[in-house]
Amino acid sequence: MFGNRQKAAPTMAAATHPTSRAPAADHARSIYRDHLLSCRPMLLDDGQYQARVAITYLGGEKTRSQHFLDLDAFPSEAAANERAVQAAQAWVDANWHKL
């Protein structure tokens, strides 16, 4: 019954579209106070990098995550990563006791 299905042709992903914003090639991960910090700067149209980070709580019975998507833009990927880590650590410091 399902054996004759054909795969759809791949479409151009948003990250590869020439006018879209795309994540930088690599992202940094680290652990801070039982939280996984996943930094993934986004390359903007103007050549700068928007600092972005996802924070995932690794302890307890329930996984929780907080995403920072609206951090500042920086001229380099390294600077964006550094800011993302700082923001994530500050968020953990302010919220870890609530988990």
Image (cartoon, rainbow, N blue to C red):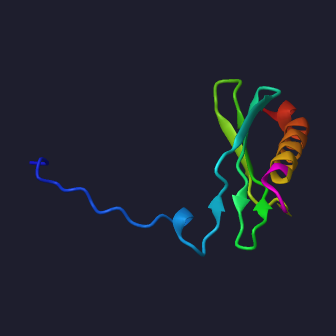
Residue drawn where x is 82% and y is 59% of the image: 71
Residue drawn where x is 64% and y is 51% of the image: 25
Is 77 one of the magenta-colored residues? Answer: yes
Quarter occupied by residue 46? bottom right
- From the viewer's side, name the closer residue of 78 and 50: 78
- The percent coordinates of residue 78 (x first, y second) are 82, 49
- The percent coordinates of residue 49 (x first, y second) are 77, 61
Residue drawn where x is 77% and y is 26% of the image: 34
- 14 vs 89: above or below: below
- 81 vs 95: above or below: below
- The percent coordinates of residue 87 (x first, y second) are 87, 47
Quarter of the image with the C terminus is top right
Q: Which residues are magenta?
A: 74-78
The answer to whether 95 appears left or right of 68 in the picture is right
Q: How many marks?
A: 0
Residue drawn where x is 74% and y is 57% of the image: 69
- From the viewer's side, name the closer residue of 45 and 89: 45
Quarter occupied by residue 22? bottom right
Is 86 one of the magenta-colored residues? Answer: no
- 96 vs 61: above or below: below
The answer to whether 92 appears left or right of 43 in the picture is right
